[in-house]
Amino acid sequence: MNTDLGLTSGLITKLFKQPAEPEEWLHYALSEKQILHYKELGYLSGVKLLSEKQLPPLRNELMQMTDPGHQGREFFYEYHSNESEDPDTTLFHALGAWRVRASFHDLLWNPAFLMAAYQLLGKSFRLFHDQLFSKPAHHGGVVAWHQDYSYWTWTAPIAHLTCWIGLDDADPTNGCMYYVPGSHRWGLLDKESLSGDMDAISNQLTEKQLQDFSQKVPVEMSAGEGSFHHPLLMHGSYENNSENSRRATIINVFADGVISSREEDGSNAPGANNYPHVPKGEMMQGTYYPLLLDAEQSLIGVASQVPTINDFQ
Ligand SMILES: O=C(O)CCC(=O)C(=O)O
């Protein structure tokens, strides 16, 4: 019998030491400048989230999980050994690793991630789901330009945040992500295929938006660094034709209070049927949508020293 780690509320490993006192959270705080960057441009990159010691266990568990026969596979919400639509390339993509392997479970409670996410959302928040995106060397596939929330309209309102964490150094040669700065103000577009034509979204864009693509920025980061982006920010990543793999894990969260807007007819249903179900109109909460940071409890006595996005409205 395999164990669903999503049922474990405490930490399983010793990888991510928790602050013993509220003051300790302050070590992890983003600066006002970083928060303003996120607010203006819709993203913030280069945030150190993992140490050299924390990377190997995550890489090792990712390797285990890319074997489709691994123990616990049934707990994934979605599992695609190769989601690429181009038969010559490979894109491993899976959602739900936190239920399958201990280091990925505990990563959700990494204080460096929790603090930054709190500051960029300005509220206590819950796990939506995690993701793995792995592009092998030489033939890694694309992730087409998209806005995350176009896949998430079964939850509302838009109060979500994505954190992308590199398990390898990433740059344009091995298929790093690109952002279009400021595109989080474009409004919501329809979703296109995630791993087919890189530019499929372009038929929905205005001339001005198409021009904005010339400002796209590569998210070049070292392994262990993370970038945060807004749920409406346009982003994507090109092929990996280099000698190096490009592995990443992603944590998607939403502010406490987001509700299910999932239509019973399935018209806006998530990409597979294995997501923990919350009836329409009810709050997204419970075992599988745990409260990752309860600011009132964790930041008691120090909250006023922590700048958040709410300070810049
Ligand atoms: O890892 C990638 O290339 C794509 C990741 C992505 O789409 C995301 O973090 O929302």
Image (cartoon, rainbow, N blue to C red):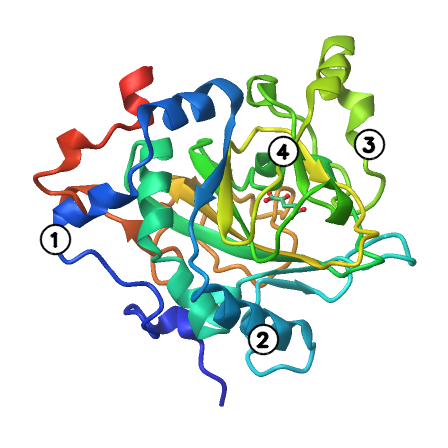
Label 1 amino acid? Answer: Glu
The residue tagged 3 is 199
Q: Under tag 4, what secondary structure?
A: loop
N-terminal of the pair, mark 3 or mark 4, is 4
The residue tagged 1 is 21
State the image coordinates of residue 78 (x, y, percent, origin top left).
Answer: 63, 62
N-terminal of the pair, mark 4 or mark 1, is 1
Is residue 188 among what the camera can see? yes
Seen at 78% across and 10% down, the residue is 207
- Label 3 vs label 4: CA separation? 13 Å
Label 3 amino acid? Answer: Asp
- Label 3 vs label 1: CA separation? 48 Å
Q: Is residue 291 left or right of residue 156?
A: left
Question: Which callout, 3 or 2, points to the residue nearer the camera?
Answer: 3
Question: Which callout, 3 or 1, points to the residue nearer the camera?
Answer: 1
- Label 2 vs label 4: CA separation? 28 Å
Label 2 amino acid? Answer: Glu
Q: Residues within 10 Å of mark 4 (few under 14, many from 20)?
A: many
- Nearer the observer, 271 or 9: 9
Q: Under tag 3, what secondary structure?
A: loop
N-terminal of the pair, mark 2 or mark 1, is 1
State the image coordinates of residue 131 (x, y, percent, origin top left).
Answer: 57, 56
Q: Residues within 10 Å of mark 2 (few under 14, many from 20)?
A: some
N-terminal of the pair, mark 3 or mark 1, is 1
Label 4 amino acid? Answer: Gln
Are the residues flagged by discs 2 and 4 in contact, CB closer than 8 Å? no
Mark number displayed over residue 147 = 4
State ligand 1's quadrant: top right
The residue tagged 2 is 74
